Image (cartoon, rainbow, N blue to C red):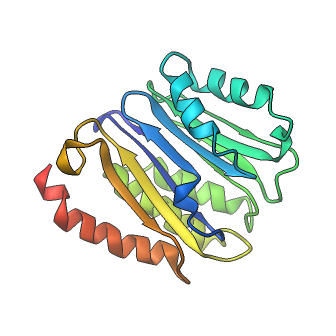
Amino acid sequence: MYDPDLEAWGVGVASKFLAVGAVVPHAKPKVGAIATQAMANAKFGPLGLEMLKERTAKEVVEALIASDPLREQRQIGVVDRFGNPYAFTGGKCKEYANHILGNNFSVQGNILASPEVLEAMAKELEGRGPLHLRVLRALEAGERMGGDRRGKQSAAILIVKEGAGPGGGDKYVDIRVDDSPEPVEELKRLMKMWESYFLTRI
């Protein structure tokens, strides 16, 4: 997702998968954000960010999947430096799998309980409020609708903004829950800590 007022890009993810935050989210200030999912190709993250320096989200997604023999098992969502979203959900991704494109965001998922998971998440991203809270609320909304039908294990939120991270870095928010029976709830607890530690200093 892209927040033009904050000039920040973010990715949120929750899954029945160990340490999903180490694989899915990729973002770079003034470049864009990428979520590589399903049978994730981790190389799509760094390769896609490099391409996004000069290409649109649509061009990057099409380029990444064009030469991938496992494209039908991939899922990828991209938002470029202008906020334009584009996504691809392969035909062999496990049901329910799909994506929704909205104003400055893409939301996608696979092995979901129902289409309502994505619809609920998109509604939260379309709402008002700080970027980190909209992303968190989207994860909570998706979970309320059943989320990953396999269950829960990990979650993460990555938001980048140039120079806004601790020590002058670009990672505005980088919070991960690698293994928990309630990863989104734990993510929410950590987000409150982040707000008290860092939000008032920016």
- Visible residue check, residue 104: no
**In the rendered picture of this protein, how many numbered marks are placed on residues?**
0
Q: Residue at x 79, y 59 (%)?
A: 96
Given the current orientation, which residue lies at the most extreme bottom position?
181
**Side (left or right) of 164 relative to 181:** left
| Residue 89, image x, y percentages | 76, 43
| Residue 12, image x, y percentages | 50, 55
Given the current orientation, which residue lies at the most extreme top position?
54
Q: Residue at x 55, y 40 (%)?
A: 34
| Residue 141, image x, y percentages | 53, 66
**Side (left or right) of 58 relative to 155:** right
| Residue 28, image x, y percentages | 41, 36
Whether 200 is drawn above or below 52: the answer is below
Q: Residue at x 74, y 68 (%)?
A: 113
Image quadrant in which you'd find residue 134:
bottom left
3 and 181: which one is in front? 181
- Visible residue check, residue 84: yes
**Side (left or right) of 92 relative to 42:** right
Q: Residue at x 48, y 61 (%)?
A: 156
Image quadrant in which you'd find residue 31:
top left
**Side (left or right) of 30 relative to 182:** left
Whether 48 is drawn above or below 144: the answer is above
Image quadrant in which you'd find residue 30:
top left
